[in-house]
Image: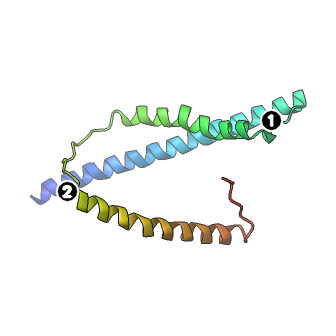
């Protein structure tokens, strides 16, 4: 029995290591493409005299497109070869659903407070809400 548990633990460790590696790969690819796009926008702006960096949609595209059009599909392709283990399906039930939902609200609230405090501490109080 002990040998079977150790084998499953080794398999799980290998899967989690690979998953972590794929997440790092996604972050690196997205960052590299974003830097390349930023350089391209800077060069275009210098040559044409049109400052594309002031356009919110260009900045949004430079951030989102490398992540969701390039990096995530590459990561998903790498993950396709990972072994899968079918999970056990259970009905959630109304009572369990509502109890989980009610637990989510304080967790979100505490996470928001922690995020705001960290943002304030790391930026020396100068952080702004980028969504606004």
Which quarter shows the N terminus?
A: bottom left
Q: Which of marks 2 and 1 is nearer the N terminus?
A: 2
x, y percent for residue 42:
81, 36
Which quarter shows the C terminus?
A: bottom right
Q: Which residue is label 2 attached to?
A: 6
Residue drawn 35% across the image and 50% down it: 16
SS for dot 2: helix
User: Which mark's residue is nearer the viewer, 2 or 1?
Assistant: 1
- Side of 99 where 48 appears, left or right: right
- Side of 49 where 38 appears, left or right: left
x, y percent for residue 21:
45, 46
Residue 15 against residue 45 in the figure, above or below: below
- Side of 41 where 102 appears, left or right: left
Q: In which quarter of the image is residue 79?
A: top left
Closer to us: 129 or 35: 129
> Few, some or many C-alpha atoms within 10 Å of disc 2 (few <14, some 14-19, many ≥20)?
few
Closer to us: 123 or 80: 123
Closer to us: 42 or 107: 107
x, y percent for residue 118:
61, 69
> Few, some or many C-alpha atoms within 10 Å of disc 1 (few <14, some 14-19, many ≥20)?
some
Residue drawn 31% across the image and 62% down it: 98
Q: Which residue is label 1 attached to?
A: 52
Residue 94 against residue 106 in the figure, above or below: above
x, y percent for residue 49:
90, 31
Residue 127 against residue 33 in the figure, above or below: below
Distance Cα–Cα, label 2 vs label 1: 56 Å
């Amino acid at each position: 029995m002990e040998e079977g548990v150790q084998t499953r633990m080794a398999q799980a460790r290998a899967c989690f290591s690979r998953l972590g590696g794929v997440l790092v790969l996604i972050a690196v690819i997205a960052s590299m493409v974003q830097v390349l796009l930023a350089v391209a926008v800077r060069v275009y702006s210098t040559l044409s005299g049109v400052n594309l960096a002031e356009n919110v949609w260009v900045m949004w595209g430079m951030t989102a497109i490398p992540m969701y059009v390039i990096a995530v599909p590459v990561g998903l392709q790498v993950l396709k070869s990972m072994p899968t283990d079918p999970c056990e399906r259970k009905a959630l039930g109304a009572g369990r659903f509502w109890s989980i939902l009610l637990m989510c609200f304080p967790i979100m609230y505490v996470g928001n407070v922690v995020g705001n405090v960290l943002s304030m501490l790391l930026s020396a109080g100068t952080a702004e809400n980028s969504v606004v």
